[in-house]
Image (cartoon, coloured by chain):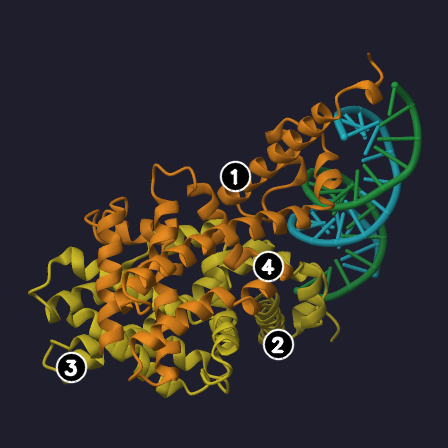
Chain colours: A orange, B yellow, C green, D cyan
Amino acid sequence: MTDPLLQDPSETDEAQAATKAAVFNAAERLFALHGFQNVSVRDITAEAGVNLASVNYHFGSKDALLFEIFRRRTSELNRERARMLHEAATRNGGKPTVRDILEAYFAPPMRWAAPDNDRRISMQFIIRARSEGTADMRDVLRNDVSHLERFAGALMAARPDLPKEDVYWRLHFVLGMVHNNRFAEFDRLHHLSGGITREGDTDALLRRMLDFAEAGFTA
Amino acid sequence: MTDPLLQDPSETDEAQAATKAAVFNAAERLFALHGFQNVSVRDITAEAGVNLASVNYHFGSKDALLFEIFRRRTSELNRERARMLHEAATRNGGKPTVRDILEAYFAPPMRWAAPDNDRRISMQFIIRARSEGTADMRDVLRNDVSHLERFAGALMAARPDLPKEDVYWRLHFVLGMVHNNRFAEFDRLHHLSGGITREGDTDALLRRMLDFAEAGFTA
DNA sequence: GTCTATAGATGGATAGAC
DNA sequence: GTCTATCCATCTATAGAC
């Protein structure tokens, strides 16, 4: 019975998958909290309670582990956005309004980042990937614009009177609004405003963002 | 004559200052191009053509050198903004319009980042400091909001009808627009738009940004 | 003051036992 | 497959010669 070959193979598989998942989650958490360069493979394996070699065995290298977390989380997030855009299109006979399109882009990351959401860590990881990411990640961010193409196309359909160049630039400004929703920036704003800005009220913030961006698009 | 004590002291001082400046400029350039963590003290001293110990001799440590570059460049940039805001106030009898206030905030970094401007490297350094900065820099960014207070106050004076909370949030959105003007984001937009967005036309981009932000403030 | 040589510490990756 | 022990590269910082 101690011969591994006689054991139920699913037990081994499960144990293996559990180790891999433990590494994945510990890495995501530590990277999100402390930054990519400030977390070592030793930190990750210690947090996950596995041995030092696990990262290389299951993922190949530290960078490959980072990249796998990045790919999974960004595709999950963009899938949510695509679904919301699709739903808005269905509601409006295939032609959603500018506000509905913007909401499909804004709402998922804000939902993830809400104080009580267990996706909050994943959101922080994605935010870090934008600025601290490896060359691999930056290449993906630069070249993989397929999810943005749907939004750009929808905006052009909603505002056929606008030159395409204008739509792209306004989309760029809107992306800046989203990317600036980092914890450090909220802290800074809180400090500047003497504490009257409450970023924890996700619904109110979403409404403010939509008001501002919609006005910019309407001009 | 070979006794250093008999030389003109200004010669020694000048040579010292030249070495320090060479280290400063080489460091700023390399950090801006390749990121803070990807540049070693060896890279800097090799680029500057000085010996390895110079960084520690003149600045104390690698982090202290980084911090000194950061402080000098951010204070120069914010001084330009403050001057533009002051000039706008003078032109309008102490009460500049929303658009003038926004222009005073937008124009200096865009001028620095223009393709033919020799401040372009400094601008890229500042942009990196926002995301890759050490704990020291992030503390400064978080707590030193004095230059933003002038802008927030001017906006409230220009729009006394708006609740202060609204002004702070809209200022936050505007800051996001500015922070998103990174080279990587321009590349991404260029790729998305099939090349019709020309970020090199600084004047046109500034006008677009002002149109969008002013509309968001007017709503 | 400048420079070389090196200390001292850290981290990614891997060989080899079990 | 798991884990320990270790290799090897890299980096900052500094001591000490000149």
User: Residues at badges 3 and 1 in contact (C-beta under 8 Å)?
Assistant: no
Residue of label 3 = B90
Indicate the secondary structure of the residue bearing disc 2: helix
Observer-nearest of A178 and B18: A178
**Which quarter of the rendering shows the N terminus of chain A?**
top right
Question: Is residue A209 visible to the viewer in this orientation of the structure?
Answer: yes
Observer-nearest of B178 and B216: B216
Label 2 is placed on what type of residue?
A: Glu
The numbered mark 2 sits on a residue in which chain?
A: B
The numbered mark 4 sits on a residue in which chain?
A: A
Label 3 is placed on what type of residue?
A: Thr
Label 1 is placed on what type of residue?
A: Arg
Q: Is residue A44 left or right of residue B151?
A: right
Residue of label 2 = B11
- Among the two numbered marks 3 and 2 on one chain, the one whose residue lies closer to the N terminus: 2
Q: CA distance from mark 2 to mark 1?
A: 55 Å
* Other residues around mark 3 within 10 Å, as few (<14) / some (14–19) / many (≥20): few
Q: CA distance from mark 4 to mark 1?
A: 18 Å
Q: Residue at x 32, y 51 (%)?
A: A186
Residue of label 1 = A29
Question: Is residue B103 visible to the viewer in this orientation of the structure?
Answer: no
Indicate the secondary structure of the residue bearing disc 4: helix
Observer-nearest of B170 and A219: A219
Q: CA distance from mark 3 to mark 2?
A: 45 Å
Q: CA distance from mark 4 to mark 2?
A: 49 Å
Q: Is residue B168 left or right of residue A154?
A: left
Q: CA distance from mark 3 to mark 4?
A: 47 Å
Closer to the camera: disc 2 or disc 1?
1
Which of the labelled discs sits on residue A137, or is there none?
4
Position of residue B143 measured from the top left corner of the image (x, y, whole percent): 33, 52
**Which quarter of the rendering shows the C terminus of chain A?**
bottom left
